[in-house]
Amino acid sequence: MLKYTLHKRFVKLFIVVFVYIFAMVVALRFAGVWDASQFKNTILWSLTVACVSVFRVNKIDKDQDYFKNAVFDNLKIVAIIEFIVAFHNFSIITELAIVPVIFSVAVFKEFTDGKREHSIVNAIASWILFGFGLFLVGNAAFRLAGDFWGFAKPETLNNFTLPITLTILFLPFIFSLALFVRYELAFVRLGIIFKENERRRYAKRAAVILFNVRTNLLMRWLRDIRARTPSSNMEIRASIARTKELAEREKHPKQIPLEKGWSPFLAGEFLVERDLRLRTGDYHQDFDDDDQWFASSPYKEIGEALFANNLAYYVEGDEHIARRLKLVANVNDPETALETRQYLEEVVCLLIRCALSCGLPEALSQAIKSETSIELEIEGKIARLQKESWPSERGYNLIFVLESRNLH
């Protein structure tokens, strides 16, 4: 880990980071909103918010509200802790010990966040940060009771607003860094896809000019041309135009008559209500069959077990019409199947309501509860539930399909 962190590219990156921070501080100094008394707060912000933001840069494309959340998270947590710390001056030895420890714990939490195999480490890191925050809040409350006017002074407001100001000024750097990382990754992939130097250089130029800051479209394009590699500059431009055209369709979906099916873009949003969050990715062509198109959601884990049961949502059809909506529940642990069946029933109910504007039939509800295969007609569509045992006999799938009677 230490060898990786001290890799020369990381060293160069953090040199650039701290040069940018220094430039921000100089600008704030000239603007009259920073002075030497803010030095400790600035160092603490740099070693927490700034460094952790750099480690999180690969999550920007996955979080549509990343920049808004960055500001509000800082407002709710980091800024409060910073002005509390600033109000209570620990000894220099204590502060030198606390800052690197908290920074290390925050980094460990960030690296393990969302990784089930490291859930214990993530939980320990979360509790350490939570406990440290409680200690600071409790300590500040105690001192406030005895010295309110020592707290209620202009310096306190400055300490509170400084990290917010630094975070807002730091966001353009994080955005630029994310852009650089994405294009660097894209250029590596283009080097694998295009063997000819001239074609590779043209693809890189075209990607930068035509996609610019829309790196989500860049990633879609890279996925698509990996299976269908353009053989000329004209085909490269056409493939990019195709990716952008599909993105525009996604933004302005057309209504599809129910007897034919559903808009694939609208269908991908059917299960985003409440806490389900089963939004699909982009609707795209199947790599093995040019006539088939699909979109799928990430697997949603059910429960807290190490090998938890999970569920995914699929939208399938042709280029313009989704004709099949599918839910696949993987029961990795049959002992927790009851919770999975309850969750599947809730999701099926929502899917039928959004797709067909009707309720869950009692026969289908009972079939889910008993894990019994069933096929029935709902509002002119075929609804089918089936159970598929795995060859290992250690688990099974519960598959629900809602599809048009005529798939062609």
Image (spheres, rainbow, N blue to C red):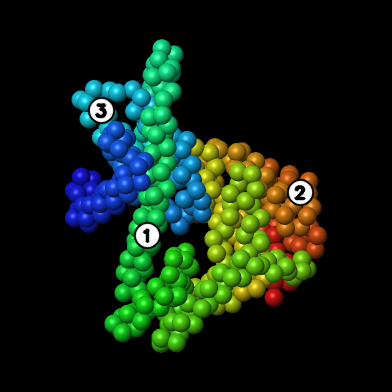
Percent of width and height locating residue 38: 31, 35
Whether pointer 1 and pointer 2 mark residues with C-beta atoms closer than 8 Å, the reply is no
Question: Could you tell me which residue is drawn at 44 percent across and 66 percent down?
Answer: 213
Q: CA distance from mark 2 to mark 3?
A: 59 Å
Q: Camera-side residue: 162 or 121?
A: 162
Whether residue 111 is visible, yes or no, is no
Q: Camera-side residue: 114 or 402?
A: 114
Tag 3 or tag 2, which sits nearer the N-term? Answer: 3
Q: Which residue is mark 1?
A: 176
Q: Which residue is mark 3?
A: 95
Q: Is residue 368 left or right of residue 220?
A: right
Q: Camera-side residue: 321 or 58?
A: 58
Q: CA distance from mark 1 to mark 2?
A: 48 Å
Question: Could you tell me which residue is drawn at 36 percent across and 66 percent down?
Answer: 183
Identify residue type, mark 2.
Leu
Identify residue type, mark 3.
Glu
Whether residue 233 is visible, yes or no, is yes
Q: CA distance from mark 3 to mark 1?
A: 32 Å
Q: Of the residues tagged 2 and 3, which is closer to the observer?
A: 3
Q: Quadrant of the N terminus?
A: top left
